[in-house]
Amino acid sequence: MPRSREQCAQIREDSKKNILDKSILYFAKNGLDGTKIGDLVKAIGIGQGSIYCYFKSKEELFSEVQKVSMENIGLDEFDKINSGDLPPIRKLRYISDYVVKNLSENEMYCAYIHLAFYARMHGDLQAENPFFNMVRKIVIQGQKEGFFSKGNADKIADYYLGVIYLYGMRKLYDPEISIPTSAELERVVRG
């Protein structure tokens, strides 16, 4: 029996999701410039033309991979924490605990972190990054309340994200690397 339009649309959506999901780890380990479509499709296990059925270019695929990664770093969880009536030091601890636990236990989370922060860590400071914005807001609140070190809140938030990014990358290449504790990570903010 022929497939319905809905079934065909679902198959197409599932195929696109499969390409995205399998591209995340590859892009995280190889970067945009280090990724060749021919190598990527071999790693995914599809024909080279298949990617172009869903994405116009490697750059478009990479952009989609970054969006998926941002969605998977825990922003919903962080928003719950941030919206609560907690002191900034507690908000930062909850976020740090979540990030440290996931970096330690989940290779895909390391890839998500790398790709979600990629633009910012490669010099595009104008790129929208909700995680950076949230950390910056917590830093500013913590500075006002005397919990965190004085200084430029953007730089302090970048330092915090930079440490997370660094250890996420290191964990991708060396699964045995020791991830900093939450307290060690927070030193960047607390001074």
Image (spheres, helix red, strand yellow):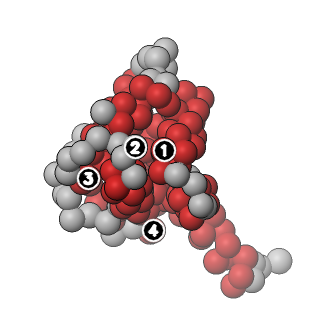
Left or right of 87, for residue 121: left
Q: For the residues carrying marks 2 and 4, which lies nearer the camera in this image? A: 2
In what element is the residue under mark 2? loop
Residue 179 percent across, percent down from the top left: 46, 23
Q: Name the residue under label 2.
A: 147
Determine the CA span between mark 1 and mark 3. Answer: 15 Å
Are discs 2 and 4 less than 8 Å apart at CB?
Answer: no
Cα separation, mark 2 vs mark 4, equals 48 Å
Measured as percent of width and height from the top left, residue 71 is found at 52, 59
Query: Measuring 47% from the left and 51% from the top, which residue is drawn there?
Result: 88
Q: Quadrant of residue 168?
A: top left
Q: Is residue 17 left or right of residue 157?
A: right
Q: Mark 1 points at which residue?
A: 89
Nearest to N terminus: mark 2 or mark 1: 1
- Nearer to us of marks 3 and 4 is 3
* Amino acid under disc 1: Ile
Question: Which residue is identified by label 4?
Answer: 54
Residue 30, above or below 154 = above
Around disc 2, counting alpha carbons within 10 Å, would you say few (fewer than 14), some (14 to 19), or many (20 or more)?
Answer: some
